[in-house]
Image (cartoon, rainbow, N blue to C red):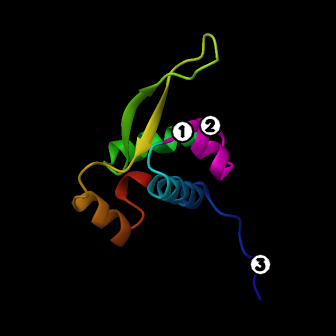
Amino acid sequence: MTDPSPAGQHTLRRHNSALVLRTVLDTPGISRAAIAAHTGLAKATVSSLVDRLIAADLVAETGLVVRAGRAGAAPGSRCRPPARMGSAWRSAWTTWPPAWST
């Protein structure tokens, strides 16, 4: 039996992108901070992955959310699947990973 090699950066990014996308699909309207808490990924990692998913038209943001009770806190945003479930969605699941993840 051969020893498995550690996952490379490309493999890890694909896995984490799929994890974030699945979380958004399962919980439309979830915030980036909540995605980080749910997945165990760092907030900066989630933010980067969400930006990539938005650029690929696989995730959309619903707008800013003001966080109550936190003076000086920056507004957050909610993530959801795009309003139209077009060809980008179909190709993402039939030809995963998308070209932008390489």
Nearest the viewer among 71 and 89 is 71
Tell me whether the residue at label 2 lies in contact with that at label 3, contact meaning CB atoms closer than 8 angstroms.
no
Return the disc, 2 or 1, that comes first in the chain's sequence. 1
| Left or right, residue 68 beside residue 53 | right
- Camera-near label (2 vs 1) is 1
Per the image, label 1 sits on a secondary structure element best described as: helix
* Whether residue 76 is situated above or below residue 95 in the rendered picture: above
Residue that numbered label 2 is attached to: 43
Tell me whether the residue at label 2 lies in contact with that at label 1, contact meaning CB atoms closer than 8 angstroms.
yes
Q: Would you say residue 32 sits in the magenta stretch?
A: yes
What's under tag 3, amino acid-wise? Answer: Asp
Give the residues drawn in magenta, as a range: 30-44
Q: Work out how far the residue at label 1 is from the one at label 3, CA to CA, in angstroms.
A: 36 Å
What's under tag 1, amino acid-wise? Answer: Arg
Q: Residues within 10 Å of mark 3 (few under 14, many from 20)?
A: few
Per the image, label 2 sits on a secondary structure element best described as: helix
User: Looking at the picture, how far across and down is residue 45, in whole percent?
Assistant: 59, 41
Per the image, label 3 sits on a secondary structure element best described as: loop
What's under tag 2, amino acid-wise? Answer: Lys
User: Looking at the picture, how far across and down is residue 5, in whole percent?
Assistant: 71, 70
User: Looking at the picture, how far across and down is residue 3, in whole percent?
Assistant: 77, 78
Return the disc, 1 or 3, that comes first in the chain's sequence. 3
User: Looking at the picture, how far across and down is residue 57, in whole percent?
Assistant: 31, 48
Choose top left, top right, bottom left or bottom right for residue 36. Answer: top right
Residue that numbered label 3 is attached to: 3
Return the disc, 2 or 3, that comes first in the chain's sequence. 3
Choose top left, top right, bottom left or bottom right for residue 4. Answer: bottom right
Residue that numbered label 1 is attached to: 32
Nearest the viewer among 63 and 12 is 63
Q: What residue do we see at 38% from left, 47% from top?
A: 59
